[in-house]
């Protein structure tokens, strides 16, 4: 049974989500503040975390919690579920490593579908590596089953959304992928600025290991491509 932790300070909303998720077969635990949630995470990580941004007296407590979680695990699926729908907050949340950013007006079936999609991607990591699941492009190696990316044999710590974007670009070097193409590959629905933020984060992560990394180029007005 997959374990989900939801961090939401409004009791009625938190209990409603917990009830719905339990009915779908998940083991769910809820917290109403960042310190308690962070303490629980330090003892045992869930399989997925759903976090609001404003938590009691901490206006950006969810952002802080997301950063802490991402430091503990580069692959743990994290969803922001919040009433804050500004582009600024969305970009901030994804830059901090969240895999999805949803607003509270989302329908419950859509929320369940997004959770299931993230679990499907995460479960691939437990699949044994087979040679035909490895993709090599020069210094780049991608293990599709384990959702791992290596550059010059160094593991690049990517979120699941970032992984699928790199995979989409690298599988056809030289071909331009539009932002919509990348959304389809990563199974996310976000605006163009959010895709741009993901690409910037991906470049930065590669450049931590190779300052001259330049394989992901911007094709203005069209999208992005992986250099051949």
Image: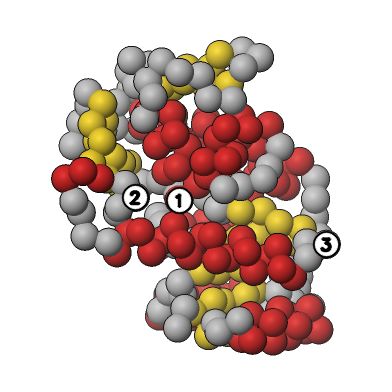
Sooner in the amino-acid sequence: mark 3 or mark 1:
3
Please tell me whether mark 3 sits on a helix, a strand or a loop.
Answer: loop
In contact (CB < 8 Å): disc 3 and disc 1: no
Disc number placed over residue 147 in the picture, else none: 2
Q: CA distance from mark 3 to mark 1?
A: 24 Å
Say few, some or many: other residues with alpha carbon within 10 Å of mark 2 (under 14 / 14 to 19 / 20 or more): many
Quadrant in which the N terminus is drawn:
bottom left
In contact (CB < 8 Å): disc 3 and disc 2: no
Disc number placed over residue 56 in the picture, else none: none
Could you say which is closer to the camera, residue 87 or residue 28?
28
| Image position, residue 196 (x, y; %) | 60, 30
Sooner in the amino-acid sequence: mark 3 or mark 2:
3
Q: Is residue 51 visible?
A: no
Q: Which residue is mark 1?
A: 160
Q: Is residue 183 visible?
A: yes
Query: Which residue does the image show at 61% across and 81% down from the upper left?
Result: 24
Please tell me whether mark 2 sits on a helix, a strand or a loop.
Answer: loop
Query: Which residue does the image show at 54% across and 60% down from the upper left?
Result: 117
Q: Which residue is mark 3?
A: 105
Compared across the picture, whether 38 is left or right of 60 comes to left
Can you tell which quarter of the image residue 42 is in? bottom left
Please tell me whether mark 1 sits on a helix, a strand or a loop.
Answer: helix
Up-down relation of residue 135 to residue 106 (above or below): above
Compared across the picture, whether 18 is left or right of 10 comes to left
Query: Which residue does the image show at 37% across and 28% down from the upper left?
Result: 170
| Image position, residue 149 (x, y; %) | 31, 41
Can you tell which quarter of the image residue 151 is in? top left
Query: Which residue does the image show at 61% across and 53% down from the upper left?
Result: 100
Q: CA distance from mark 1 to mark 2?
A: 7 Å
Q: CA distance from mark 3 to mark 2?
A: 31 Å
In contact (CB < 8 Å): disc 1 and disc 2: yes
Compared across the picture, whether 6 is left or right of 102 comes to left
């Amino acid at each position: 049974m997959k374990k989900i932790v939801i961090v939401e300070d409004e009791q009625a909303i938190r209990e409603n989500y917990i009830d719905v998720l339990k009915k779908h077969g998940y083991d769910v635990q809820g917290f109403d503040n960042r310190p308690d949630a962070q303490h629980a995470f330090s003892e045992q990580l869930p399989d997925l975390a759903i976090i609001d941004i404003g938590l009691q007296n901490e206006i950006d407590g969810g952002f802080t919690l997301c950063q802490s979680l991402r430091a503990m695990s580069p692959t743990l699926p994290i969803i922001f579920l919040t009433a804050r729908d500004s582009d600024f907050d969305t970009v901030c949340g994804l830059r901090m490593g969240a895999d999805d950013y949803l607003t509270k007006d989302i329908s419950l079936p859509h929320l369940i579908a997004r959770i299931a999609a993230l679990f499907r991607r995460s479960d691939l990591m437990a699949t044994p590596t087979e040679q035909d699941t490895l993709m090599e492009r020069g210094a780049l190696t991608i293990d599709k089953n384990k959702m791992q990316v290596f550059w010059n044999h160094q593991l690049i710590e990517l979120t699941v959304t970032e992984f699928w974007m790199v995979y989409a670009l690298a599988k056809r070097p030289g071909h331009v992928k539009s932002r919509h193409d990348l959304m389809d590959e990563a199974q996310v629905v976000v605006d163009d600025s959010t895709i741009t933020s993901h690409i910037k984060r991906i470049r930065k992560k590669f450049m931590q290991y190779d300052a001259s990394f330049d394989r992901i180029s911007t094709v203005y007005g069209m999208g992005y491509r992986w250099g051949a």
